Every structure is written in structure tokens, then in C-alpha cells.
Image (spheres, grey):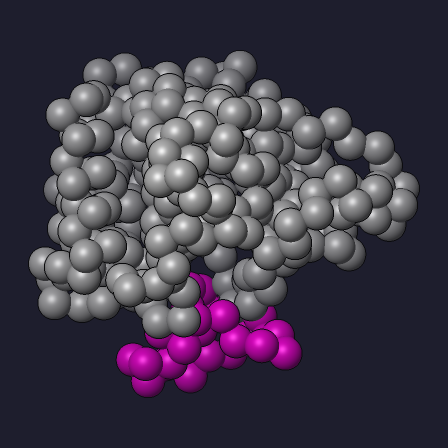
Amino acid sequence: MEQQKPLVSAQDVAFFQEMGYWVSPVVLGPERLAQLIAHMEQVYEGQFETGRSPWPGYWQPGGNPQALRRTVNASWSDHTLYALATDPVIGAMAGALMQADCIRFWHDQLLYKPGRGTGRETEKANVGWHQDWSYWQNCLEPSLVTAWVAFADTDENSGCMQVVPGSNRWGLVKINDFFDQDLQRQQRDIERAAGRTFRPQPVPLKAGQISFHHALTIHGSGPNRSDAPRRSLAVHLMTGNTRYKKFVKDHMNVLLMREDGAQLNEGDLFAGRHFPVLYPKAD
Ligand SMILES: [Fe+2]
């Protein structure tokens, strides 16, 4: 992506800070999208051009093709996906929205929500309401943002992401479950626990558009009722002042920090080779 002019206006920043999400113009063209889809398929076939597999424990080649495929750090396996996950234009947009002078890669998730084209029912393809920060409790502050890159058009019929506008200002709610399939019951439970009413806002995207959501923004998605699969890469990013905090369970990125022998102390920055800088762009 070449950045011709600032893609994020002051109005966009104000919208993001108020509502917790923002949708970019189309920033990826058809040629790049076709490449991304081809490389997504290569990863699903187990062709890892870097020789490195994605992070274990999530959807891997050979997994149930009818389930929601959620492959963590697919960018480790593929140069084309890595280029997207570390794209400086995405970094610049995230930096503007978060009002941060540095944006680093946190991790990514290659997502594939099967359509009905195969004639088989998709299994457990809803994404339950959750705030990303609830899964990143090793981070001291919710100083993270997700760029959700649509490889194909997605709308309510194909199970596009839905957000709860303004929930980025609610703090961490007690009920968070990516895997919960009953979004309506979950909504009632969250409303009761948070003492607030929420109206989900679908975020339809054209292929090549990117939606950004803050780490505290409640989001989820419903089933894909279309014939085509819903394809995307969720690029999780952090500001340059994202710091470690102890938690009962270590996030994979804590393990990666320790891999290099770091003695992690409360308040240490997440930095180093596993967390490349997207913004400012290195020359
Ligand atoms: Fe999420």
C-alpha cells in the first residue's frame, strides 16, 4: 500500500475515540487481495513458505474445514501475510487513531468463516461478544487496537463483525467469551453486569477495507449465511508504550519475550524481534 495522503482525519480520530471503532476507505486493490487469498489457501494446505508453522493450539491444516478457522500468527508462515500484518499504512492509521507515536505488531489471526456453498452446515462459527483486552491481561493498559482486514466483501448475511459503539469507554466488563455461540443470552448477561444497554452495530466491509476497533470495544459476529466464505486477517497491534503486567495465565507473547531470556518485570515494555514496528516506518 502506498500512502498518498493522510487516510485518517481529525474527525475520524474523534469518531474512533468516542465510538471505539472506525472503518477505512478501500486501501487494498484487487490484485493484492487475490494474492492474499491465494496465500491464505497455501497456509491452509500446510505450505509454509517460511518453513515456520503458525502458533500451535489453534486451527491448523487438517482441522475441521467447516469450523470457524482461526489461525494465530499465520504471518509467521507466509511472506505475503507477514507483509500485510506489518504494513506501514496500517501502522500509520493505527497510530493516528490511537494518538500514538509508535505502533508495534502484537499478533495476528487469519480468519475464515465457511459459507454454505459446500452444502454443509458450518459449525460453531459465531464469535461471542468479547473485549480483546480481556485476553490480553498481561498488558498493563488497554493500549492496543485491532485492524480487521477484509479479503472479500462482508455484510450481515455473511456474518460481518458487529461492535457495540461506545463500549470502549465502559472499562473491562465481567463477561467476555469469544467462544460463546449464544450472542443474545450473552448480550442480556453483559447488559445486566455492566448496567448498560447496548445496540450492536454491524460493520459491513468491502473487500480491501479495514475496520479498526479499540481493545476495550465489545465485538462479536453471527453466522455466515452466504455461499462464500468470509475471509480476513485480524492484525492486533499495540502502541509503543504497552507494558507487561503479571497475570494468572501467561499470554503467548509473554512466552515469546522469555524465549529470548528476558527477565520480565512488571512495567517492562513489550518490544524486541517478535514485535516489529509498523509505525513510524523504518527506512
Ligand atoms: Fe476480538
Residue 206 occupies which quadrant of the picture? Answer: top left
Q: Is residue 250 magenta?
A: yes
Q: Is residue 30 magenta?
A: no
Q: Quadrant of the C terminus?
A: top left
Residue at point 59% right, 32% down? 162
| Nearer to the camera, 24 or 33 | 33
Residue at point 32% right, 18% down? 26
Residue at point 28% right, 56% down? 74
Q: Position of residue 141 (x, y in %)?
A: 60, 55
Residue 158 in sight from this viewpoint: yes
Range of magenta residues: 245-270
Q: Is residue 49 left or right of residue 189?
A: left
Residue 16 in sight from this viewpoint: no
Q: Is residue 209 above or below residue 57?
A: above
Magenta: main secondary structure equals loop
Residue at point 56% right, 30% down? 21
Q: Position of residue 5 (x, y in %)?
A: 27, 15
Q: Quadrant of the N terminus?
A: top left
| Nearer to the camera, 119 or 58 | 119
Q: Position of residue 98 (x, y in %)?
A: 50, 36
Q: Is residue 25 left or right of residue 89?
A: right
Q: Position of residue 175 (x, y in %)?
A: 75, 55
Q: Is residue 103 above or below residue 133?
A: above
